[in-house]
Image (tube, grey):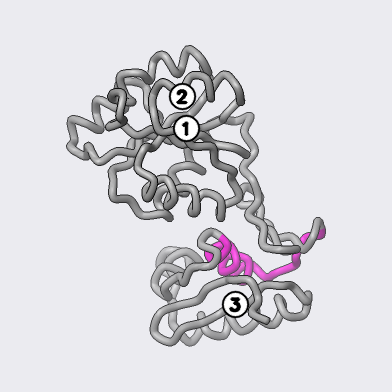
């Protein structure tokens, strides 16, 4: 699935592109408002990330024109204008969401997926690492196109790590995501769960590995040779 990023700052655009690519999306980028409409007419983007402070104007002021060009597109404003009034203006002007800079990459991806889930005809892409993939809509892992059979907690751990592939996820975040409210959690239990998942990944002879860092957390990454 391809999304459009409207951002003139190359470092911010690179950060967005890297994060979004790892989540299974492709990215096209333009840096000026005048380039947006031709891009929208050339491809049926389901979602656009739109900055406000662009060299040729405020992205928000052109939003209605962009919606006329592509009525069904979802739009997330990503802007350093982060006051309450700015956010209210953005949402009331037709944006589906508003994310202030600087932003957390995980939050950006969560907001992208939430926006796309609200569009019932949009199918979220799987995150793919070699032969291993994860379908977040179905909460199901696959090896090639075969379901990867895991116990519930193992699947939850893999989902947490696949969302942030190639980055360490801290213990607290993982335990919050894999345990139900009120359920007891401990580092030792997480360690045993990670050991079981690591063994299952190895048994499938996948080119990924579950790495750990004492006192930090776990990361799913391409296997080191």
First of labels 2, 3 by sequence position = 2
Which quadrant does the C terminus fall into? bottom right
Q: Say if 143 sits above or below 93 in the image.
A: below
Which label number is shown at residue 48?
1
Question: Dot 3: few (<14), some (14–19), or many (≥20) neighbours within 10 Å?
Answer: many
Q: Whole-Å distance between the Cαs marked 3 and 1? A: 33 Å
Badge 1 vs badge 2, beta-carbon distance below 8 Å = yes
Where is residue 101 drawn, in percent x and y?
A: 28, 46
Q: Which residue is mark 2?
A: 36
Report helix, strand or loop for mark 3.
Answer: strand
Report helix, strand or loop for mark 2.
Answer: helix
Where are the magenta residues, as a range?
A: 146-162
Q: Image quarter for residue 93?
A: top left
Where is residue 58 drawn, in percent x and y?
A: 28, 25
Question: Dot 1: few (<14), some (14–19), or many (≥20) neighbours within 10 Å?
Answer: many
Q: Nearer the viewer, residue 119 or 80?
A: 80
Q: Image quarter for residue 120?
A: top right
Residue 110 lies left or right of residue 3; in this view the side is left
Q: At 73% from the left edge and 80% from the top edge, which residue is drawn? A: 202
Q: Whole-Å distance between the Cαs marked 1 and 2? A: 10 Å
Q: Which residue is mark 3?
A: 210
Residue 180 lies left or right of residue 81; in this view the side is right
């Amino acid at each position: 699935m391809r999304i459009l990023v409207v951002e003139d700052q190359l470092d911010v655009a690179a950060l967005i592109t890297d994060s979004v690519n790892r989540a299974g999306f492709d990215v096209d980028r333009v840096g000026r408002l005048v380039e947006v409409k031709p891009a929208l007419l050339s491809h049926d983007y389901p979602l656009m990330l739109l900055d406000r402070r662009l060299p040729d104007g405020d992205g928000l002021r052109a939003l209605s024109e962009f919606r006329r060009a592509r009525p069904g597109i979802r739009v997330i404003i990503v802007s350093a204008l982060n006051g309450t009034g700015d956010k209210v203006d953005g949402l009331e002007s037709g944006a589906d969401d508003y994310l202030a800079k600087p932003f957390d990459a995980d939050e950006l991806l969560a907001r992208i997926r939430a926006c796309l889930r609200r569009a019932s005809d949009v199918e979220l892409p799987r995150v793919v690492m070699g032969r291993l993939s994860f379908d977040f809509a179905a909460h199901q892992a696959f090896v090639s196109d075969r379901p990867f059979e895991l116990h519930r907690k193992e699947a939850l751990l893999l989902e947490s790590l696949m969302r942030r592939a190639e980055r360490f996820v801290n213990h607290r975040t993982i335990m919050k995501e894999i345990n139900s409210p009120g359920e007891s959690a401990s580092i030792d239990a997480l360690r045993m769960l990670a050991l079981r998942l690591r063994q299952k990944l190895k048994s499938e002879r996948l080119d990924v590995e579950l790495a750990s860092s004492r006192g930090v957390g776990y990361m799913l990454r391409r296997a080191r040779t």
